Amino acid sequence: MLDGFGLAMFLPLLEIVSDPEGTASAEQMGNLAFLVYGMERLGLSLNLTVVLMTMLFFFTFKGIVKFIETYVRVVYQQFFMRNIRVQNISALAEYSYDHFVSADSGRIQNTLSGEVNRVNRAFGSYMSVMQQSVMIVVYSALAFLANPEFALLVAIGGILTNLAFNKLYNATKKLSRELTRHNHGFQGLLIQQVALFKYFKATGLIREYARRLIEKVHHIERAQRKIGILGGIMEGIREPLLIAVVISVILVQINLLGGTLALIILSILFFYRALTSVMQLQTFWNSFLGVVGSLENLTEFTTELRKGKEKTGRQKFDTFRQAIEMEHVSFKYGNTPVIKDINLKIPKNHTIALVGESGSGKTTLMNIITGLLQPREGRMLIDGMDSRTLDMATFQRRIGYITQEPVIFNDTIYNNVTFWDEENDANLERFYTALKRASVYDFVINETPKQEKSMLGNNGINLSGGQRQRISIARELYKDVDLLFMDEATSSLDSETERKIQESIENLRGQYTIIIIAHRLSTIKHADKVVVLSKGEIERSGTYLELVGQSESFKRMVELQEV
Ligand code: ADP
């Protein structure tokens, strides 16, 4: 509006320029004459200085408003981004393990990193579209005020040309969805290349794998290029097309309808602005459509995360006191029964070893006990409370988990063990105690360059398999937990390392409730109970000695290991 009033001042200006001695009159301004009357009422006579100063006033005021607009836009855009990020990160944290295992990790990564930025662009473009729409309405209204007949004709022409663009818009939208899909694929492959780097390198597969990634890069390039070309076509033909419309209308008005050039000029000035806005609107709309695939993807992604939210009870768990009891627990992946009618009691501070062939359901059973998976049938009581009514996150805080593939963060030994706890005397003491109990104290003190400040992970010192395992054990011991879950490494560590790890675990027996997926005899020999699983059912359970006496198959398993 301010811009329009500023522009309207051109007419008095032209009049004064053509007659430097005189002052401007209001007649030329059509329905905008009120501006001139308004100034006269303020006691300003319309000479050159006053007209120029009025223009300066309107445009300065416009500048201030422009600044406010930009500021507001940045604030809203960032608010929007933050909300999307925070919402999705929180939803991912509450996403159930059940859903997670069947989710596409490339998509998760890509959506939360690259796609969020593209959605931000979509938001920016969309806001610009809204803004340009307002501009078009205002300038068109001003143009109508100045010269209604002319304005109407141009508007009709503009709308007709716009229809021609619809086809191009649809093509862009389709390409945008394609692009999002390729981006997911690319991220998925990339994550695996980084995670499985060693394997790919050692087996010489890395080049072949890289070729698959490069293929994706080409797909992405092709989609981007097509979107770019479509954008270029629209950019190129838009202005000539609109100018052609304006010229036709001018010719019609002057030659057939007999309008005056002065009023047409003001109308053209406004229309020029309106048409610039139309063009910008189209550009922004097209760039919005270019990222619409990302927007749709994010919407679906957020819905899926919400749907896959962990179902959890409200009852808080503070500390483990008595026992975990499983009553007729069954579990299915899809329609395939994996765990069938399990009855098992795990008293506090007992060590339970789960053994059985690969695929017999050990991992699934462990996942049920940790609360990662919920029983489909039957129930699990923890200190007498049903796992369904329990707020499982509070139970899980009492759990330490030592996985086959040790978890090492790219950070110092101290942070690896304490999970970024504050570094004070009390915590340091606890840290050293944990190192000692995990039999890794001597290694940290004597063999690392900067002791607890030594960096681990990709950018730090390289640990042996056994050292990694013991650092992970130290982390679980540093935490104040009641239950320790262990997934014994199947890959053979050297016997000295194995002995050390075994020793560290042996020391913990009786102090923690330990549930261990065991592959080694030494582990099950001292367990309070060995549970033999077969095809998802408990085939037998008892102490090591009892089982050797009772079961032929168990005896065979033992003999095989001793070879
Ligand atoms: P174990 O740990 O004893 O090797 P698991 O508990 O990993 O056995 O697997 C038990 C069975 O469940 C296997 O037949 C396996 O194929 C199946 N299974 C495991 N995870 C999934 C999954 N995410 N989706 C479908 N089936 C699965």
Image: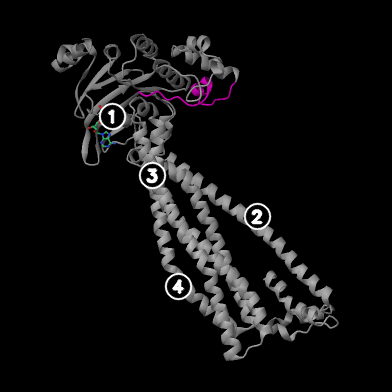
Mark 1, ligand 1, within 8 Å: the answer is yes
Q: CA distance from mark 4 to mark 3?
A: 35 Å
Distance from the alpha carbon under mark 4 to that under mark 1: 61 Å
* 513 is within the stretch colored magenta: no
N-terminal of the pair, mark 2 or mark 3, is 2
- The secondary element bearing badge 2 is classed as helix
Q: Do the CB atoms of the residues marked 2 and 3 lie less than 8 Å apart?
A: no
Q: Is residue 421 above or below residue 136?
A: above
Stretch of the chain drawn in magenta: 404-423
- Between disc 2 and disc 3, the foreground one is 3
Q: Secondary structure at mark 4?
A: helix
- Which one is in front in this view, the residue at disc 2 or the one at disc 1? 2
Res 216 label: 3
Residue 470: image location, x then y, percent: 42, 16
Q: Point out the tag, 3 or 1, that comes first from the N-terminus.
A: 3
> What type is the residue that disc 3 sits on?
Lys
Quadrant location of the N terminus in the rendered image: bottom right
Compared across the picture, whether 365 is left or right of 313 comes to left
Q: Which mark is residue 558?
A: none
x%, y% of residue 175? 40, 56
Task: Report crowding for label 1: few under 14, some 14 to 19, many 20 or more residues within 10 A (C-alpha).
Answer: many
Q: Position of residue 59 (x, y in %)?
A: 73, 66
Type of amino acid at the residue the image marks with label 1: Leu
Q: Residues within 10 Å of mark 3 (few under 14, many from 20)?
A: some
- Label 3 C-beta lies within 8 Å of the nearest ligand 1 atom: no
Look at the magenta stretch and give its main secondary structure: loop
Label number found at residue 163? 4
Residue to which mark 1 is pinned: 365
Q: Give the image quadrant in which the ligand numbered 1 is located.
A: top left
Question: In terms of sequence position, does the residue under pointer 4 or pointer 1 come before the other?
Answer: 4
